[in-house]
Image (cartoon, coloured by chain):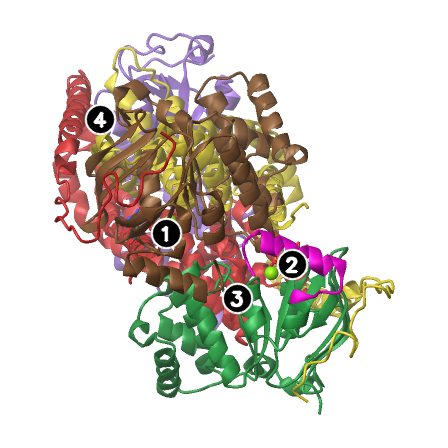
Chain colours: A purple, B red, C yellow, D green, E brown
Amino acid sequence: PAKAQERTPQDPRLMTPGKLTVGTGDPVYPPWMLDNDPAAGKGFENGLIYALAEEMGFAREDVVWVANTFEQTIAPGPKNFDFSIQQISVTEARAQVVTFSQVYFQPDKAVVALPGSAVEGAKSFDDLRAARWGAVIGTTDLTYLENILGIEEAAVYDDQIGVFQAMQAKQIDATVVALPTALYVTAVQVPDAQIVALLPPDENDRGHGLLFQFENPLVEWVDEALSAVIARGVVDELKATYLVADPDLPIITE
Amino acid sequence: MSLPAGPGGSPADGAAVRRPAPPRRRNEWRAALVPTVISLASVVIVFGVLGWWISSAEQWPRVKLQFFNPEAMAAAFPRVLQGFWISMRIWLTALVCIALWALVLALVRSLRAPWFTPFRLMVVVYIDIFRGIPVLLLVLLFGFGIPALNMPGLPNSGLFWGTVAMVLSYSAYVAEIYRSGIDAVHEGQRAAAKSLGLSEWQTMIHAILPQAIRNVLPALMNIVVALQKDVALLSVIGVRDAVREAQIYTATTFNYSSLVVAAGLFLLATIPMARLADHVSRKDRERRLQRAG
Amino acid sequence: MSLPAGPGGSPADGAAVRRPAPPRRRNEWRAALVPTVISLASVVIVFGVLGWWISSAEQWPRVKLQFFNPEAMAAAFPRVLQGFWISMRIWLTALVCIALWALVLALVRSLRAPWFTPFRLMVVVYIDIFRGIPVLLLVLLFGFGIPALNMPGLPNSGLFWGTVAMVLSYSAYVAEIYRSGIDAVHEGQRAAAKSLGLSEWQTMIHAILPQAIRNVLPALMNIVVALQKDVALLSVIGVRDAVREAQIYTATTFNYSSLVVAAGLFLLATIPMARLADHVSRKDRERRLQRAG
Amino acid sequence: MTPRIEIDAVTKYFGDRLVLDGVSLSVAAHEVVCLIGASGSGKSTLLRCINRLVEFDHGAIRLDGVPIDDKRFGATGLQRRIGIVFQSYNLFPHMRVIDNVTLAPRKVHGVPRAEAEDRARQLLGLFGMGDHATSYPEQLSGGQQQRVAIVRSLVSKPDVLLLDEVTAALDPELIGEVLQIIRGLKDEGMTMVIVTHEMGFARDCADRVCFLEGGRILEQGPPRTLLSRPENPRTRRFLQRIIDAGRL
Amino acid sequence: MTPRIEIDAVTKYFGDRLVLDGVSLSVAAHEVVCLIGASGSGKSTLLRCINRLVEFDHGAIRLDGVPIDDKRFGATGLQRRIGIVFQSYNLFPHMRVIDNVTLAPRKVHGVPRAEAEDRARQLLGLFGMGDHATSYPEQLSGGQQQRVAIVRSLVSKPDVLLLDEVTAALDPELIGEVLQIIRGLKDEGMTMVIVTHEMGFARDCADRVCFLEGGRILEQGPPRTLLSRPENPRTRRFLQRIIDAGRL
Ligand SMILES: Nc1ncnc2c1ncn2[C@@H]1O[C@H](COP(=O)(O)OP(=O)(O)OP(=O)(O)O)[C@@H](O)[C@H]1O
Ligand SMILES: Nc1ncnc2c1ncn2[C@@H]1O[C@H](COP(=O)(O)OP(=O)(O)OP(=O)(O)O)[C@@H](O)[C@H]1O
Ligand SMILES: [Mg+2]
Ligand SMILES: [Mg+2]
């Protein structure tokens, strides 16, 4: 009977059969999720989850959100969620200790700085290398700075607020962030700051995926549902709603 | 004139003639008045100039907005207070456990019988290691590692194991403080207790420890105050203490005022305690000076 | 038989008859052997069972993979070592500054002249506040707040101001430790120094402080060790110390072994120091027991 | 009759230093023996060997014929029967006088608090310290502290009292006070071994005086004989120096 | 001739407690005055007033006619001219003997180290401590420590030496040793004020003995007179108790 219930909302392999338990950050940031409230369904990531849940046969109220710190999400041992969504990039090393779904989104990177900074009017990577950089720990932004731009001594902060504080204190000139985050920060949180340029994607960064406990058997089922959702154009729709960029921004490629 | 004056000569204070002693000179206060005024004035001036200088900086309003914003403080207060209760509960629990476990460590390190030699050594190693390893790592190792092992019979709560890690780490520090207090108690006290027939254990409890702890009260207060804030380390394993709540607010609003609120709450809790410890030390010292009959 | 034995009677030790004294009893070691063996064995057994129990847990390989993975350690090592040098540099600089500034605070709090009353009060307030506020907040306030003010003439390096914040905070703790050491120096030492014509200042420097610091060596060692790890707090303002480098590795690979590497480096630095401090204390104590002539 | 205390060729090393070199001495019940000798001659060490504060290397010490490390004494029997008073009093500064005195009865001998305090108050009263039961030691004068220390060692009704330079830290007036108390104990028949520098007191009070040097008893005898006509030249030299210092 | 030290109706309170009650005393150059009296009678306080370790409330103390708080002495002039030795030695335990002795000359009086050490070694040799210059105080016996303390106060060539129960913590043999040294100082003409409980020494050595009680000088006179035929009944009672204690 258990086998028969697999791949239904009553799947015994779920944290709580009948519920889809989804981990996320604490707090959650726009535009990934708006208003620090995943359950409201406003935002790119929670929008995606509700579409996915529907695809898997869950009712909207059967989606249960659990807030976790980054450390809790990556800790060994049993997790308190079926999977977690938190702009987590899929990499080889990480895949040794957790299991990822397929990639659902590959963000562009953007250079953000205050007006009058050293990166304003930069035309090439060489121009960018002359500036002082900062990034947030646990993101692929730092890897991007080091591997693509070749910046050695980037400062690393706990969160975006640290990065922008350092910018205002004139301790760094600019940062690289995922474009959606850049859009939100420059629009709402630090209106002074602006997107200076867009950067090409990192081939080694495969993009965001859902994070499962290592060798969680649910992956197949979720992957299938995710493919269906992507095929339906849901992701593109969400991108258009929450993650649009100014088409006139300059792009620096080398 | 090397001849000594006789008892009758020179201004000797005869026992028969008894003048009343002049009253105690009361102008000590007045003597201290001028310097007090001057130094208070200098303090006011120094701080005034500093304050004026800072607040006249062009960027001051922005910094003020981000660190000392009354509205943000008010908004953050309820959540931070809620976290503060959690901080306090963990803090008090950990304090009790640390006090006891550190005592065990210190006692083992202070016992003299040959039976204890290897245990003494173990305690030295324990202290070196647990003091040397960053608490953060211990919290991660215990808070995630042990529950992950999924051992039957062991509790599974990250909070529990995180607190255990804090206790193990802080105990190493406190044990060293206890030990310095115990070492400072005079050897004669041990001899006296032993000669009364007290066992080594009773000697410790009744004779040595009460004196040892008084010896190191300020250092212990340091630990008590530091621990209160280090409870925040448990936030990596998901505990929402005061600092964590403040940081969540900070991260969402890009405003540090919530941390100032948390700091205010900590001060409210620690300052009375610091004053109490001072008071105890002072009374102790005074008793030592004042002698009856 | 209440009559005392005369000098000639009973086994009196005549000065004329001189037997060689029996040699010192050397079996103290042997007396300690059995308990040593037993307790060592018990230690081995306890740890053996614990180790076996943990490593037999079904999930142990996974925990081991994330915390004690030799490959990850090797991979993280160069970056962590690089961060470790930064930690060490900040640590040593801060240690020197803390030692001096805390000394000033402790001295002001210990001076007796009425001139100093308001300054004494200020120091009490300073200690209460800087000890009570989370270092994290101070580091943020100084590391971001002051440079953001953009004041002419002030450096705007976050590292500089973050270190200043650490120094201000830790000095409050160390000042309290110094003070307890100063209070423990016997009053007679002050009187002696004063009677030799030493000024209050010289009395402190030459007579009181050297004794005070010896009194509180273990508590000071605690601070030295704790500070080394708390340098990691500067990482919130972007400093890449050993812990931060380890965390970066952890965040990219989801593997905590890098933190174990950092812990190992810290232990390498602190254990020899702790042994040195113990050695100094022990020699001090031994000198006190051993008397010439 | 077996002597109350029998010290039989006791040898003690501290590290490699020979501190007691085959000391033999027996003390009868109700006898008062004074130990005199230069600083470092081993007087305190000998006294501390008797109640096992110090473990010796060779020889034997017997109390009423039973070796002091015999199992028959149990954990605390020896301490109950042999009290010691130290030069520096060694009262517990964090306890009131009454708690200092009743600590051993209550914690070691299991006497109920009320009973222990009754007896303690009675003894304190006897020694003129009735009013100070609730004072802390630091609030008392040296003589008062020393009296409390004596009461503390008497409260368990020991058979033997060991006194180690109990007057050395006192001023002359207080010395008189404490010596008077010891005389009283002698009159009541207490067996005592007393280390003292008060030769006058030794002369008045002791049944026997022993002169120690270099960890050996060089000479012993009734006080009148030993203090006035010492046989050993070293004893003579020691006493001469004491006389020079204005004592005796 | 002005007296070397002139104490003129000095009154001192500790809190509300009257400790010195209008004490007047003058000490001529080369005179040795002994202060005796019960514990708490104010002897140490009087001594400490003389070199300003304690500030008094009323009255005046003059050194060679100059008030001791006069600006003419500067910061350290008084301490250079008046040395004091304490009962508990108060040597600095973290300094070697030679550093203890040369601290004041080097740091206060600006004597170069070599010169200061030369003089110190010479004095230490004089007092039989030449071999112990590099020992730490804790490695010395009480008598040796006390000798170092005396050397330390003599090294700046003071005109007056104040001695506060310098033998109280010593055993009788060491007492003799230290008293011998003080006799030597007297023979060299040092002006001294000595608080002592050694009546024998006071009798031999003092030019005058003062008996203090309750912060007042009740009686003073040449030692033979005061110690043998005291006029004041309280002095008599005090001396009687000392005699009972076996001293004098
Ligand atoms: N715990 C100890 N460790 C090492 N040596 C010690 C110890 N206790 C005493 N000694 C040494 O043993 C010797 C005898 O000491 P003891 O205290 O018995 O002498 P004493 O006759 O009582 O002298 P005093 O009159 O100074 O009290 C001394 O040389 C002393 O330094
Ligand atoms: N610093 C102080 N604070 C308060 N009271 C003090 C202080 N120093 C001394 N006294 C008190 O002043 C009185 C006189 O003390 P002082 O030390 O001069 O006596 P003394 O004659 O030297 O006695 P002793 O023979 O015990 O040394 C005592 O009652 C003492 O308690
Ligand atoms: Mg002794
Ligand atoms: Mg005195």
In front: label 3 or label 1: 1
Closer to us: E84 or A138: E84
Residue where numbered disc 1 is placed: E226
Closer to us: B107 or B189: B189
Residue type of the residue flagged with mark 1: Leu
In front: label 3 or label 4: 3
Real-space CA distance between mark 4 and mark 2, rounded to the nearest whole angstrom: 100 Å
Picture quadrant of residue A109: top left
The range drawn in magenta is: D228-248
Q: Are marks 1 and 2 on the same chain?
A: no
N-terminal-most mark, 3 or 2? 3
Real-space CA distance between mark 3 and mark 2, rounded to the nearest whole angstrom: 24 Å
**Is residue C216 part of the magenta span, yes or no?**
no
Residue where numbered disc 3 is placed: D86
Residue type of the residue flagged with mark 3: Phe
Real-space CA distance between mark 4 and mark 1, rounded to the nearest whole angstrom: 100 Å
Q: Position of residue C47 (x, y in %)?
A: 66, 63
Q: Position of residue C281 (x, y in %)?
A: 58, 45
The rendered magenta stretch, by its main secondary structure, is classed as helix
Residue where numbered disc 4 is placed: A187
In front: label 4 or label 2: 2
Element at badge 3? loop
Quarter the N terminus of chain B occupies: top left
Residue where numbered disc 2 is placed: D239
Element at badge 1? helix
